[in-house]
Amino acid sequence: MNFNNYIKIDTVSKAVLFLSCNEENNEILIKINDKEIKEIKLKQEFIQFFTCSEDFSNPLSPEFHIEIYFNNYVISYEVTGDDKEEIEKFYEYIKSILI
């Protein structure tokens, strides 16, 4: 699975489009205030801060969670997959976009 297909960067408007995914053993969940959505476009300038947690130790299902905080809501980005190396790379990629 190529996780980069689920992130689109719009350099003109300085925004990032996040898409959800549910394929075989790979899953990307996006939630706004705990309500699941299919996609969201975020303008980077409005991100106040974000927190990260990861668990790459489970060989069957490495995962990470990123909480992105805005003024009035929280976006939860949860990724689970079967390829530990791919999940770790994707985790670093997402963090680099948000910084």
Image: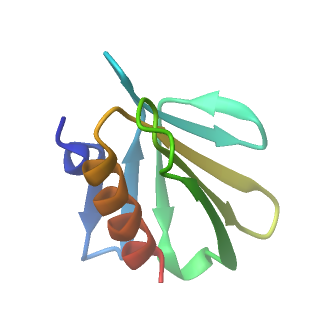
Q: How many marks?
A: 0
Q: Residue at x 62, y 75 (%)?
A: 47
Q: 61 or 40, which lies in front?
A: 61
Q: Which of the 4 image quadrants contains residue 74?
A: bottom right
Colour setting: rainbow
Q: Is residue 34 left or right of residue 99?
A: right
Q: 1 or 20, which lies in front?
A: 1
Q: Residue at x 46, y 42 (%)?
A: 62
Q: Position of residue 97 (x, y in %)?
A: 38, 74
Q: Position of residue 36 (x, y in %)?
A: 64, 29
Q: Position of residue 37 (x, y in %)?
A: 57, 31
Q: Residue at x 28, y 39 (%)?
A: 83
Where 33 sits versus 67, above or below? above
Q: Position of residue 10 (x, y in %)?
A: 27, 67
Q: Is residue 19 left or right of residue 86?
A: right
Q: Is residue 10 left or right of residue 73?
A: left
The residue sitting at the top extreme is 24
Where 46 sits versus 28, above or below? below
Q: Quadrant of the N terminus?
A: top left
Q: 49 or 79, which lies in front?
A: 79
Q: Residue at x 25, y 76 (%)?
A: 12
